[in-house]
Image (cartoon, helix red, strand yellow):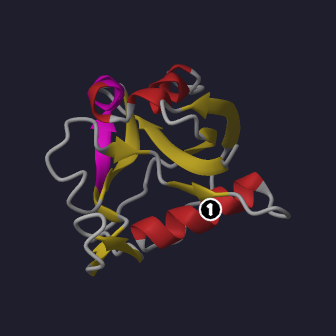
């Protein structure tokens, strides 16, 4: 089974805990209610999962992942069966002016032999942990309960 690794940034303020999540790009996700994800990607055969999570964050957000205290939140499993190893990083001062994601080529519509290039991520932002519970793909919600500040 495929293993992905992701980086879940979090911060705590007067209102509570917030997490940094990303909206998946492309037409399939455009109008879906649970189209948000922890920035993540596939771990290669000889790759360290935490280093994969940092690399994927940079590719999907367009800026290097911030340094900060790291907590290994373990694995969550998505409905597709994909396993995601999630690392939390406390990042109270993290900001991004504009998301600059890498792109992927997809066939649209399937079977048409017509290919288009779409961003892997088309938006990312800080949201409250309660908002994230209804925005994240369902299989990733369990990671929110494991946050050190949660």
Total tally of numbered discs in the picture: 1
Q: In this view of the protein, which residue sits in the foreground, 38 or 4?
A: 4
The verdict on residue 129 being magenta is yes
Quadrant for residue 74, please give it. Answer: top right
> Does the magenta portion include 110?
no
Quarter-of-image position of residue 75: top right
* Horizontal side of residue 104 vs 6, given as left or right: left
> What residue sits 25% from the left and 63% below the top?
26
In this view of the protein, which residue sits in the foreground, 101 or 108?
Answer: 108
Left or right side of 51 for 78 = left
On the question of residue 65 being in view, the answer is: no
Camera-side residue of 28 and 128: 28
Provide residue 81's location: percent of width, then percent of height. Answer: 57, 34
117 shown above or below 54 = below
Query: Can you name the residue that lies furthest to the right here?
Result: 46
Look at the numbered disc 1 and give the secondary structure of its residue.
helix
Residue range corresponding to the magenta coloring: 124-133
In the image, what residue occupies the spot 30% across and 78% down? 113
Quadrant where the image shows the N terminus: top right
Q: Where is residue 13 in the image (x, y as percent from the top left)?
A: 36, 33
Callout 1 crowding tier (Cα within 10 Å): few <14, some 14–19, many ≥20: many
Residue 87 found in image quarter? top right
- Taking the spot 61% from the left edge, 41% from the top edge, the residue there is 84
Residue of label 1:
54
- From the viewer's perspective, is residue 68 above or below residue 116? above
């Amino acid at each position: 089974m495929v293993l992905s690794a992701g980086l879940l940034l979090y911060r705590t303020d007067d209102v509570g805990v917030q997490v940094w999540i990303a909206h998946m790009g492309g037409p399939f996700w455009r109008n879906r209610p649970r189209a948000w994800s922890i920035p993540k990607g596939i771990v290669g055969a000889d790759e360290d999962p935490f280093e994969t999570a940092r690399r994927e964050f940079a590719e999907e957000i367009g800026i290097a992942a911030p340094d900060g205290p790291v907590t290994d939140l373990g694995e969550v499993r998505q409905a597709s069966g994909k396993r995601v190893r999630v690392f939390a990083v406390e990042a109270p001062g993290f900001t991004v002016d504009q998301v600059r994601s890498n792109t992927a080529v997809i066939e649209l519509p399937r079977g048409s032999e017509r290919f288009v290039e779409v961003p892997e991520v088309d938006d990312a932002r800080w949201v409250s942990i309660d908002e994230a519970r209804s925005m994240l793909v369902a299989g990733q919600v369990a990671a929110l309960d494991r946050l050190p500040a949660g």
